[in-house]
Each structure stands twice: as C-alpha cells, then as structure tokens.
C-alpha cells in the first residue's frame, strides 16, 4: 500500500509539471511509459498524472491564454477574469467544481456501468444536430448581417482547418491547432493592446458557490460524452452546455476579447471611466465567466471518471491516457476510478494552495514575455509534432486573428472540432 501511495504522489507531481508546461500531454507520456512498463503501478501512475494535469492546465490557460485539449474553452472566460484581477478566484472555482464533479461522478459510476451497454448506439444518432444548433446559436447572436456572416466565415474556415488537421498523421495535432487559434493569436493582439492582465491578482479566501447548476450540468454532459463517437474533447460538450445556465451569454459573444482596445487605438480614443451601468454589466459577465469555468472543469473531470465505465461497458475509452491505463492493469474499474478521484482531490488542494501564492506575482509584466512564450510554443510544437505541426500553428494563428479583426467572438473558432465531428456523423 505504501508503494501505491508513493506512485500516486509521483504521478500527481508529474501531472502538475505537465499541466504547467504546455506540450507535455499525458497521452504522450503514457504512450512512452507503456512501452517500457506495465502492471498496476503504471496504471496508478498514469491515472494520477492525468488527474493532476487536468487541474494544473488551468493555470497557463487562465493567465497566459495557452489552451489544453481538456480545458481549451477556459481560455476565454479565464483570461477575462485574470485581466480583472480575479485569476485566483477563477482557479478556485475550477478546483471546487472539479472536486464536486468527481464526487458526483463516483456516485453515478454504478449507473453508468449499467446504462452504457444499453444506451450506446441510441443517443449518438442525433448529436450532430445538437452540435449544429450550438454553432448556429453562437453565430446568430452576433449583431447585424455583417457580424453573422463574419462569424460564419470564421467557423467554416476553422472547420476546414480542423478537418484537415484531425485527418492528418501529425502527432497530438490538437496541440498546435489550439495554440494557434487561441494562444498565439491572442498574444499577438495583446502585445499591441493597452489592456493586460492585472498586475496584482486579488486574494479570495471564500468562493461563492453559485455555480452548482453548472457542476450538475457538467457532470451530466461528461456522462454522455463517453457514449458519443467523435465527442472526444470536453470542449465539444462545453459548447453544448453553453446553451444553458447563462454560459451562452458569455461564450456567445458578449465579450470581444481585445476588440475594445483595438478599436480604441485605431480611432485614437482615450479610455474613460466606467459608468455604474457598465460596472453592473461587467459584473454580470464576470459571473457568467465563473459559471462557464465551473462547467468546463466539471465536464473534464466527470468525463475522466466515466471513461472507466465506457471502457468496461462498451470496450471504448474516450480518453487516451486512461485507455492506456486500462490496458496495463487488470484492476477493478471502481478502484481505478477511485484513484482518479483521489488524484483530482489532491491536485485541487495543491491548486488552491498554489493559487494563494500567485497573489505575490506581478502579472503586469507578463505581456513583455509574450514573444518568448510564442517562441517556446513554436519549439514545443516542432519537437512534438514536427515541421507539419509548425505549419498548423502558423495557419491556425492567422485564422485565430480573424475574430478580433472582424469584431466577433473568438468562440467561433471552435468550429475546428464541431464541423469535423458533424461530418463524421454524416459521412
């Protein structure tokens, strides 16, 4: 038992490191380890690694806009809160939501083991319609014909790129795709913008738990995600979940990240004091951002728990690292899911402690290191994906700049995974 505890802790520590260092994905690490090791120890290590990586990937996502495939949509609401000095609060919302989702998912695991063999093949038939509805809702929320047409163009171009990338032979192809669409494009505009992350992030001792509905919805979406072929990313389920509980008001385009500053600089306008009505509007959008973060964290964690039920019930695991863990161990599904839940809990505690220490960091200087971060991402993409990955990074960065240039929400670039998924169902 002591050896298992040590392996669990080592897995969590490596998960923390991989979460903080974009490009070091658990699927890649797991595949490398599986070539040399096997057995229960490896299974525990991989599961703990994956759980901790989910939690700590929120840090580069929220503070630097660098996405991970499990937490990619947290870039938009998380980065907004960080700019307002609420990044620590955002991290704690993610930690609380993840722990709650892990507990709920463990309670529902027996039901999932019973229902998955019965429901598989039934619920998948109409999911492509839901995905089209989701993207249509986001496009239609844009103002005017020009805004809607621009949003549709961004979604289609992103979808075409996503289809080519996902059908390529590039290793870990989502890494350069998401980095270009979100991180690199966002940093390029941020370097010219007057807006930046608040230098001092406000310490939050107590987080208001007003996102319980999002935790419930995220857990439910994570349950269904493992039943649906082609729905391999929590981001796809988060787009569907964004239609509910106010998430669509945030993700659908009320915020135009970077656009206000770009417009102000182009027109030579100076910033003015916020009015009382504007402050109320910003507070409402901030609350929507918190809830959307809670939704994303709950989906990522619950999908991980239910992946064990999917592996046991229908022989398929939608999470690569957990599929490798399942193949290397003959342990009980409940046992492995329990290890994952424990890893989530321990990593959430570490994340909360880590978040408290961030108040001493001066994030006002982050913009000055954006060129170095972009160079690092390009190098990481080259090492992980080769020269083809660098080409994907460059093209996706160009497409990622279009929403800001057109004045529409960046959420439309998620057509990169919605449209290929719809095509998968249709053809």
Image: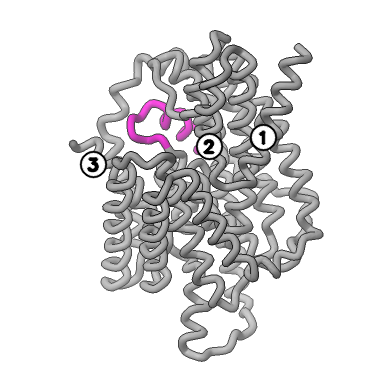
What residue is shown at x 60% (from left), y 45% (from top)? 57
Residue 409 belongs to the span the image colors magenta: no
On the image, the x and y values in percent for residue 391 come to 37, 56
How crowded pointer 3 is (Cα within 10 Å; few <14, some 14-19, many 20+) is rated as: few
Mark with earlier residue (1, 2): 1
Mark with earlier residue (3, 1): 1
Q: What element carries label 2?
A: helix
Q: In this view, does 40 lie to the left or right of 345?
A: left
What residue is shown at x 36% (from left), y 62% (from top)? 399
Disc 3 from disc 1: Cα separation: 37 Å
How crowded pointer 2 is (Cα within 10 Å; few <14, some 14-19, many 20+) is rated as: many
Q: In which quarter of the image is the N terminus?
A: top right
| Vertical comparison of 232 with 107: above or below | below
Disc 2 from disc 3: Cα separation: 24 Å
Disc 1 from disc 2: Cα separation: 19 Å
Q: What residue did someone put label 2 on?
A: 300
């Amino acid at each position: 038992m002591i050896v298992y505890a040590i392996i669990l802790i080592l897995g969590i520590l490596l998960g923390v490191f991989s979460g903080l260092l974009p490009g070091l994905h658990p699927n890649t690490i797991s595949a490398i380890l599986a070539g040399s090791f096997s057995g229960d120890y490896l299974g525990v290590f991989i599961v703990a690694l994956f759980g901790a990586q989910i939690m700590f990937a929120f840090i580069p996502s929220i503070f630097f806009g660098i996405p991970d495939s499990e937490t990619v949509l947290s870039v938009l609401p998380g980065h907004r809160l960080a700019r307002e000095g609420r990044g620590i609060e955002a991290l704690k919302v993610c930690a609380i939501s993840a722990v709650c989702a892990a507990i709920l998912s463990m309670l529902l695991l027996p039901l999932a083991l019973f229902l998955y063999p019965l429901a598989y093949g039934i619920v998948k038939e109409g999911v492509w319609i839901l995905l089209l509805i989701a993207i249509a809702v986001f496009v239609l929320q844009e103002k005017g014909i020009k805004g809607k047409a621009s949003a549709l163009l961004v979604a289609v171009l992103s979808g075409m790129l996503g289809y080519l990338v996902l059908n390529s032979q590039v290793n870990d192809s989502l890494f350069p795709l998401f980095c270009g669409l979100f991180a690199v494009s966002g940093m390029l505009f941020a370097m010219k913008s007057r807006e930046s992350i608040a230098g001092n992030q406000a310490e939050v001792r107590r987080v208001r738990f007003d996102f319980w509905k999002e935790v419930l919805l995220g857990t439910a979406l994570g349950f269904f995600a493992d039943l649906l072929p082609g729905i391999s990313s929590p981001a796809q389920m988060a787009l569907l979940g964004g239609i509910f509980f106010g998430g669509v008001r945030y993700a659908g385009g009320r915020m135009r990240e970077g656009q206000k500053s770009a417009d102000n600089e182009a027109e030579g306008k100076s910033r003015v004091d916020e009015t009382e009505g504007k402050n109320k509007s910003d507070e409402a959008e901030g609350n929507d951002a918190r809830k959307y973060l809670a939704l994303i964290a709950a989906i990522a964690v619950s999908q991980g728990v239910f992946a064990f039920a999917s592996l046991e019930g229908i022989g398929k695991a939608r999470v690569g690292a957990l599929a490798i863990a399942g193949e290397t161990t003959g342990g009980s599904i409940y046992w492995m899911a329990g290890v994952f839940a424990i890893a989530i809990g321990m990593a959430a505690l570490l994340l909360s402690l880590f978040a408290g220490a961030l108040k001493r960091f001066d994030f006002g200087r982050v913009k000055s290191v954006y060129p170095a971060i972009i160079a690092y991402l390009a190098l990481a993409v080259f090492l992980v994906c080769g020269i083809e990955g660098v080409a994907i990074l460059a093209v996706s960065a160009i497409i990622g700049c279009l929403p800001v240039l057109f004045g529409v929400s960046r959420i439309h670039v998620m057509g990169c995974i919605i449209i290929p998924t719809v095509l998968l169902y249709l053809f």
